[in-house]
Image (tube, rainbow, N blue to C red):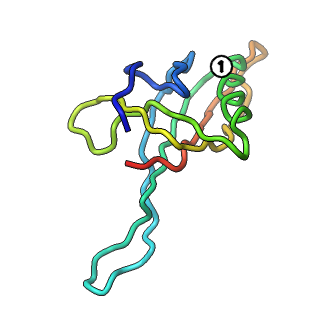
Amino acid sequence: MTQGFSGSYAINGTNLVLQPTSGRWNGRDLLGIDGAGHPIYPSIREFEMSWALISTTDFAQLNNFQLSVGNTGTVSVDLPKWGNAGYMFYSYSGCTLREPQAGSYFSADGYVQDVTMTIMGVRT
């Protein structure tokens, strides 16, 4: 994990053309409880980016990122640093991408509503 160069959301060093409307770290599922009564969590996290409204061109950029690594590759993603006191971006490597999810089309002008993309395998 190194400090990001972009100061914004980026995948493999390429800034997203349209920055997400919002982003959030997803909670981790509890794996169990150890013998001392402490919770056990997986070592990796997920981060979800979402857009309220996005053009089909910008959606294609997201989809192409996922298609380029598909089933075998990993990416480096610039995200807000987990648990940091400030809003500072860091580059997390070895991540995988879940296929972007799209909502309804908005007008004939080529926009899509409620788009999300999840970054998986983030080692914080």
Task: Report the residue at 66% width, 37% height from top.
Answer: 100
Foreground residue among 28 and 51: 28
Q: Quadrant of residue 58?
A: top right
**Circle 1 sits on which residue?**
58
Residue 48 location, x and y as percent? 51, 41
Residue 14 location, x and y as percent? 55, 19
Q: Residue furthest bottom?
A: 35
Q: Residue furthest right?
A: 108
Q: Quadrant of the N terminus?
A: top left
Q: Residue furthest left?
A: 85
Residue 53 location, x and y as percent? 60, 24
Residue 68, above or below 71: above
Task: Report the residue at 61% width, 34% height from top.
Answer: 114
Q: How many marks?
A: 1
Task: Report the residue at 45% width, 50% height from top.
Answer: 26
Residue 71, above or below 36: above
Query: Mark 1 Cα within 10 Å, few/some/many (few <14, many 20+)?
Result: some
Residue 9 location, x and y as percent? 47, 26
Q: Quadrant of residue 7?
A: top left
Residue 82, above or below 64: below
Q: Is residue 23 left or right of residue 54?
A: left
Q: Is residue 77 left or right of residue 101?
A: left
Foreground residue among 109 and 118: 118
Task: Report the residue at 33% width, 37% height from top.
Answer: 81
Q: Secondary structure at mark 1?
A: helix
Q: Residue furthest top?
A: 109
Foreground residue among 102 and 124: 124
Q: Is residue 89 left or right of residue 106?
A: left
Which amino acid type is shown beneath numbered disc 1?
A: Asp
